[in-house]
Each structure stands twice: as C-alpha cells, then as structure tokens.
Amino acid sequence: MPLRDLLHKRDTSDARPSQEFKFVRTDTHTQEILNPPSFDGSSQQVDDPSSLSPRRKSFFRRHSRSDSSHQHPHNPAEEKEKEKGERRISSFLHLDRSLARSNSTSSVNIPADLPQVQDDLAEQDREAQWEKRATRLVQGNPMLQDRPRSRSNSTVNEPQGDLNIQEAIRLHENGELEKSTKMFGILADPNGANNALGQVLYGLALRHGWGCEPNPTKAVTYLSAAASNSASIEAEALQAGVKKGGSAKGELVLAIFELANCFRNGWGIEKDPVAARQYYETAANLGDTDAMNEAAWCYLEGFGGKKDKFTAAKYYRLAEDHGNKTLGNSWIWKEKYNPK
C-alpha cells in the first residue's frame, strides 16, 4: 500500500486471504486428497510458490501432499491404527486451520477489564466508548509495558513534524527508501522527536525491509510505541470530554490495525488470533475500512473465537458503506443477516 494511501487511512496490509478448499475423492472404504492442478494466470505457474504470498504458499504446501496408498486394511485393529495415524496427519496438516477456528477467547495481550460498548447509543457516544476501549486495549496490554511511552515533546501535532513526515513520504515514493527510512527512524526516536506517525511508518519499514534489513521484532517495538503514545494522548482527550477523539486518533487506529496484522501473522511476536480479532474489531469501529473487512473475516471463519456469521455480515456491510466492497458478498444483505 502506498504511504499516501496509508495516511488517507489515518485521516478517514495484508489483503484478506482467499478461501481455501480441500479436494477429496472418496468411496465406501477409501479417501484420497487430490492436488489442485497448476494453472497459468498472469504468466506464473501456481506450482512454483516462490513468489506467492505466505498464505498462498501455505495453501499449496498443504495440498501438495497426498496419500497414494489405497490398499484396504486386512483387519479391524490395523484399520483402527490407520485411522489414528490419519487423524494425527490431518491434525498436523491443518494446524493453522484448527488454530483459526479455536473457540478460545483468552489472551495475555487482552486486558481483563476492557470497557463494554453499548450498541444502542448515539453514534458519537458509541464511538467515544470504542475509543475508550482502544486506549485500554493498548495501555492494559502487558506486551506494551516496557515499550517507549508518550513524552511531553511528542510531535504528533506539530507542524515541523508533519513537514518532515511529508518529506520522508516523498522520498519513499520516489524510490529513495534508505533516505526515507532513516528519516522515519529519526522522527520515531522516543528520546528525540517521538513522533507517533513516524513510529508507525518506521515500524512498517522495519517489518517490510524498506531500505533496511527486515527486523519484525524491532518493528513491533515501534508499532507498540506508536500505539502507546497515541493512546496516552487520546486518553487525555477523553478525560477532557472530547467525544470525537483527540489529535492522535488517526495514529492510534493505524497502530492498532498494524499490530493486529502482527498478532495474526506472527510478525515479530507470537501469533495470537484472539488479540488479532480484538484489535481488528477495535480499529474497525474507529473507522478503518480494511479493519472492517478483516474483523468480518475473523467472525466468518472463527479466527480468534467462535464463528458468528451475523456479526461477520455486519462488518462486511459496514465496509461497503465506507466504500470498501468485497465481491461475492451479496449474502450479507439478506434479511437473515440484515434484519433492519
């Protein structure tokens, strides 16, 4: 995603994974996992996974394995042992899917005292509650306890800081990645400018290796710093009675969304589906359209908690209302899922 689009998200990435299929041929006694054939789509063979996304690589690795043995067991004991072995293999091959559909709702990265949000409030009051929940989600996360905190010289809202950010973005889009990333790093320094947006962008540069060696762990440190800084500013605004959010609301939403991506994919931190879903849903309710689609997918697939197609439809509709439509989702407007 171009950085200007990222900034647009702040003022108003991984794409949502494609659905995976398993092809199985069965008869009364046997079953065989079929390998999907190679196809040539934009001059690239799918059976060459070198340039595929991590999720698609996982798909082809999973479906490239099959049991070529079709001999029937000779006795019930042997058949039972074979079934046990198949269950173990199936469990191994579908490890990520079973994790995605876990019904667990606990996570060390989710504070136990998150404030509840009432759905029957006026829109502004409801959004204020979601922002209060967002600040607690960040400030109560033990992962952030040792991260750099907000300082009095934070340049979230200072004109010079904005000018430097714009120059760094211009360098990035002109292909001068080393220069732009170095500038992001200077702006992100918690002992210097301590700029929250600079911390988000420096974190992304470290995660993706923009003009530097990729360092996902360090990337999480700076994304966490951005979340912590902006949450502190927003908490003060809420205490002052500002319902629409303070000067760092955009940075808070960006940082929460990118941390959700880290929790989901295990980028620089241990995978945590429960935290990923909570972070996506929080960013979604604060206006991030990509997070709306991701939260919908989490509920649809049971990622980080129970499946809930009704809630999934709600978030997909919310994304469409904000101009981020997903093809093939006409079902979300059926009366069953959209009673209003």
Image (cartoon, helix red, strand yellow):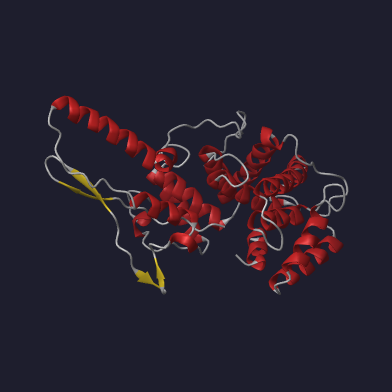
Q: Position of residue 301 (x, y in %)?
A: 40, 45
Number of marks drawn = 0
Tell me which residue sits at (41%, 39%) in the image.
95
Q: Position of residue 252 (x, y in %)?
A: 69, 49
Q: Tell me if residue 308 comes above or below residue 2 in the rendering.
A: above
Q: Quadrant of the N terminus?
A: bottom right
Left or right of 98? Residue 166 is right
Q: Position of residue 60 (x, y in %)?
A: 38, 55
Left or right of 289? Residue 86 is left
Which of these two is toward me, 1 or 53? 53
Left or right of 131? Residue 337 is left
Which of these two is toward me, 230 or 91? 91
Q: Tell me if residue 193 comes above or below residue 240 in the rendering.
A: below
Residue 157, visible in the rendered structure: no
Q: Tell me if residue 148 comes above or below residue 103 in the rendering.
A: below
Which of these two is toward me, 125 or 198? 198
Q: Position of residue 59 (x, y in %)?
A: 39, 53
Residue 313, visible in the rendered structure: yes
